[in-house]
Image (spheres, rainbow, N blue to C red):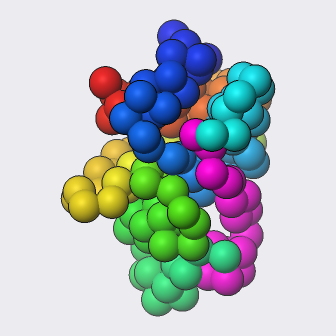
Amino acid sequence: MAGVNVADLLAQARYWGVRIVTAESCTGGMVAAALTDIPGSSDVFERGFVTYSNAAKVEMLGVRAKTLASHGAVSEPVALEMAEGALAHSAADMAVAITGIAGPGGSEFKPEGRVCFALARIGQPTFCQTVEFGAKGRAKVRKAATGHALELLAAALA
């Protein structure tokens, strides 16, 4: 996925003693699937949350309804709360969160292909980023978002 060798990513996490949790919306568990495709990943991958609905984001990750109402699900504040909530609701040391508009559709203000990411790590500030992948179709946006999330994890472990 997007040039990331997932086995190497997991080896780095293992080396540093880092456990990973995912909080996914538009990717629907694709990051967790990529991590768990590698045999032996259970010593590094702690768990994954697929929080597709706003209610799931609130109930499972503790995203504040006020944040969703103020910024919308596809926003860096929501991605940040997803990542920090995933850490709080797991035994992991690092979390990656993904929320976006895979398509088809979107709006003038939140176009198809916009994906917000957050990377949270215990004891460090949470990093947030928005990437505009463009209206390349649902499958391609989801694949690109999965690859980018893996890149964020790999960079954090390098």
Judge whether 61 appears above or below 127 on screen: below
What are the residue bounds of the magenta stretch? 44-59
Provide residue 78's location: percent of width, then percent of height: 46, 68
The answer to which of 72 and 145 lies nearer the viewer is 145
Residue lying at 67% horizontally and 83% vertically, measured from the top left: 59
Q: Quadrant of residue 40?
A: top right
Provide residue 130's location: percent of width, then percent of height: 39, 45
Quarter containing the N terminus: top right
**Residue 58 visible to an observer of this rendering:** yes
**Residue 112 visible to an observer of this rendering:** no
Is residue 53 found inside the magenta-colored segment of the image? Answer: yes
Residue 85 falls left or right of residue 52: left
The answer to which of 27 and 8 lies nearer the viewer is 8
Q: Residue furthest bottom?
A: 66
Residue 28 falls left or right of residue 124: right
The answer to which of 25 and 70 lies nearer the viewer is 25
Residue lying at 55% horizontally and 81% vertically, measured from the top left: 62
Residue lying at 72% horizontally and 23% vertically, measured from the top left: 38
Is residue 41 found inside the magenta-colored segment of the image? Answer: no
